[in-house]
Image: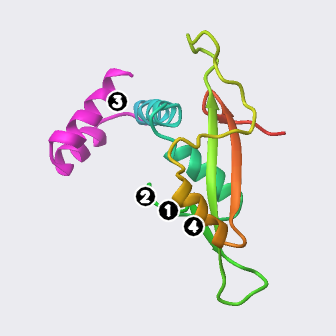
Amino acid sequence: MNKELAHVIRTYSTGSHQELSSYLIGKSKDTIIGILVDLLTMYINDKNSSTIREFITVTLAGYNHAEGKIGYNGFKQDAFVSGKILKCEAKPKNFDTHSKAKNPQKLNGAGNFSDYTFARLEKDKQEKDLKMLVSGFVDGRLEKL
């Protein structure tokens, strides 16, 4: 993480929005771009959070992203049945080519189901048109097949 990004994160978390705005106003365009790129790189590759990868997967599939960790990841209006809402669950996987793990998991379409319970499976069986969106990222970049 670069020093500028570290300062922005600290100020955002502990200071006022006015302090953050004042700090950023004085930065060059290249510095702001560097801060944003570093933040995106860090966030999209975060092993503990798939939120941004879910957002990319869901929105590229034509759904509206549903914020929050509980429930479905996306929804959209059915084009053929008036008033019907289609839901989706996103399971993005990020492969880190710089991983030090002995046997790093490759992209195989599995996604992460560690938070998927039997109760959730039973509930989802009732949802007739639930879509499972599986995507693969390499170092934070969506792979195309």
Label 4: how many residues lie within 10 Å, few (<14), some (14-19) or many (20+)? few
Tell me if residue 16 is in the magenta stretch: yes
Disc 4 target residue: 123
Q: Earlier in the sequence, mark 2 or mark 3?
A: 3
Q: Residue at x 75, y 87 (%)?
A: 81
Q: Report the front residue among 123 and 107.
A: 123
Disc 3 target residue: 5
| The C terminus lies in quadrant | top right
Q: Earlier in the sequence, mark 3 or mark 4?
A: 3
- In front: mark 4 or mark 2? 4
Q: Is residue 39 visible?
A: yes
Q: Earlier in the sequence, mark 4 or mark 1?
A: 1
> Residue 111: x percent and y percent?
65, 40
Disc 1 target residue: 71
Please report the bounds of the magenta region as a residue range: 1-30
Disc 2 target residue: 68
Q: Residue at x 52, y 46 (%)?
A: 52
Give, as a three-letter code, the residue at label 4: Lys
